[in-house]
Image: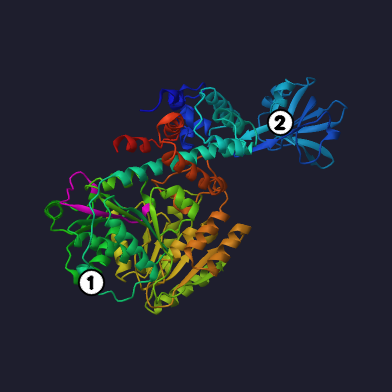
Amino acid sequence: MRPDLLNPLFAEAGGLKGVGPGLARPLEKLGLKRIRDFIYHLPDRFVHRRAIADLDEGSIGEQVVIALTPVEYRGGPSPKAPFRVLAEDAKGNLCTLAYFGRNAGWAKKQLPLGEKRWVAGRLDQFGQNLQIVHPDHVNPEGAAMLGQLAEAIYPLSEGLTQGRMAALVQQALKHAPDLPEWCEPGVVDRMGWPVWREALTQAHRDEHKEARDRLAYDELLANSLALMLVRASNRRAQGQPLRGDGRLRGALKLPFALTGAQRRAIAEIEGDLAQAAPMLRLLQGDVGSGKTVVALESLLIAVEAGAQGALLAPTEILARQHFETLRRMAAPTGVNIALYTGRDKGRARESILMGLMDGSIDIVIGTHAIFQDAVVYRNLGLVVIDEQHRFGVGQRLMLTQKGKGTHCLAMTATPIPRTLTLAQYGEMDVSRLDELPPGRQAIDTRVVAQERLGDVVEALARHFSTGQQAYWVCPMVRESEVADLAAAEERHEMLSLRFGEDAVLVHGQMKPEQKDAAMERFASGQAKLLVATTVIEVGVDVPNATLMVIEQAERFGLAQLHQLRGRVGRGSEKSTCLLLRGETLSEVSRERLALMRETQDGFRLAEEDLRLRGGGELLWTRQPGDTPFRVASRDQITRLLPMAHDDARLLIERDGGLTGERGAAARVLLYLFERDWGVQLLRGG
């Protein structure tokens, strides 16, 4: 149960004065539904103003607060011209206050002639005259204006103003109770941090680095603590040791030798499976590093030990791909592998359900349908979760509860920086596949200007004449799925004029059967070109597809560009990736594209992505079910997470966990950041 102390913070936003049906939608777009959401809706930046006695003291381009007296109104010669108010300072210097597209009556009401007003805004020069365009604030009271020398600028959505947002935040802050201290006292003293409530107030008042760091640290500590409670609970749980005898793995006839990294990962997994505590391990493998083989060997260990294995994929397309690959690779072993998705109906469905229940199916591959209540296993020993970033901690826990102490191997093809691995998977042991299998060729990566689109289309035609296939990924348009879709449809239409039915379109809004049909045409070679948006999983293994075109590549992060590039280079033929860039490139975009040409090491690119992204979200944090850090920025995660991780470990191992005075405060912290599944586990374990 959430502590009563926190109830005021979890009250609905509708309790704030001024929040009615009209504001509900814009607030919801920003995720502001409860009082707690407002207090953690921190400013993006602050406008710093200087109070000046007269215009002579001000500098052009400076944000100022000054007392001015309006002396004349000047309407423009045309309706589109600005309405101007001529005003003078204490010395008689003149300044124009210009209002574009505003009602003249509104300006006159704010600035009555002959009455002194305090004006806040940016001092500019227009011709020979000083002017302030659209003053930020006009107030008859000087004291009120001088209190806004540092003004918070908040993230907004349509329908909200800065003034309204600031007022709502200030209301919400009044509901914040005094909370017990959960941070290690030594850390607070060393970092010079204020207490929680004071940190909140300061973070909304000015650019107080210590206050912002303190709030970010709280979030990181809550996350680390919850993940450690999961880890501790898992180690206490009773699993079934799975010791294989090697007979099935010995029967595999792989056409290639395993890399050192693959052998190391398999040995680590084999060691975990032999333990009584259930395995909780993350397998991080770069694109094409051979995670599937490691997954198969792991599943075969479970089957050798008399248990069943399950592989969970995030999409039906990936589930089918895994099914075909594993069935082909495992053919010499004789194990019974089944595919089960939400689309299976009637006798086919009944047959699979019976096979899982009586144990005649050794390994099942499918979407989340394999964990529905109707699915009962005779003895589920190992769950492998592919594309782990699609599933949150809560889902990971749910999946392993289908068996008695089921082992869990999570896999991701997204190389994740070490700091963020700690943030996302702190409850797991980690294996890394950082070597590429022998025979994998480097992908020729080139940057091409968008204006050479016609040349690229002709190059595609030459490419197809050799019997090979290609992908064309359309740009991310303003992070909007609807706009992404329009861009993809437009490009597909244009390419269809040249290539007819050889070009197929796949996007996230299609019905599954349409999507599968288009994918099938491409995978079977009937279609030569797959045009797709970024929301679709393009992870289909088509060795004959040796060209990847990524449009407006400067809009993508390094990790995502690397993921997309990894869709080619899967066969024996030389592969190429063309990065089409727009006309204007920022310094960061230029560096990003240069790095793509320079290296194919996904782990290096992930670290560089973290460095270049600033406060932006990384590819993997855009996926649903992720742990979103709402308060902590990229820089704060890098600086403070290792410290929060160590503090959480101390609390669990030395300070008695959630018992005792600091433990009780930490429990409040877990509920405050809604990481209370950590508390539930402790109670359940």
Mark 2 element type: loop
Instruction: In the rendered view, tell whether residue 295 sits above or below residue 468.
Output: above
Residue 641 appears in view? yes
Q: Considering the image in quadrants, where does the N terminus appear?
A: top left
Identify the residue at the far front of this view. 654
Q: Is 276 included in the stretch rendered in magenta? A: no
According to the image, label 1 marks what residue? 250
Packing grade of label 1 (10 A; few <14, some 14-19, many >=20) is: few
Front residue of 677/129: it is 677
Q: Quadrant of residue 154?
A: top right
What amino acid is found at the position of numbered circle 1 in the picture? Gly
* Left or right, residue 583 beside residue 5: right
- Of discs 2 and 1, which sits in the foreground? 1
Front residue of 439/652: it is 652
* Left or right, residue 204 beside residue 665: right
Q: Earlier in the sequence, mark 2 or mark 1?
A: 2
What amino acid is found at the position of numbered circle 2 in the picture? Leu
Instruction: In the rendered view, tell whether residue 506 sits above or below residue 369.
Output: below
Q: From mark 2 to mark 1, how far is it between C-alphas?
A: 74 Å
Q: Which mark is residue 35?
A: none
Front residue of 399/382: it is 382
Q: Is 385 included in the stretch rendered in magenta? A: yes
Expressed as whole percent of the image width and height from the top left, the position of residue 641 reads 51, 46
Residue depicted at 52% across the width and 66% down the height: 579
Instruction: In the rendered view, tell whether residue 100 sits above or below residue 424.
Output: above
Residue 79 appears in view? no
Instruction: In the rendered view, tell whether residue 370 sits above or below residue 286.
Output: above
Region rendered in magenta:
371-388
Mark 1 element type: helix
Expressed as whole percent of the image width and height from the top left, the position of residue 165 reads 56, 30
Residue depicted at 39% across the width and 67% down the height: 261
Q: Quadrant of residue 409?
A: bottom left
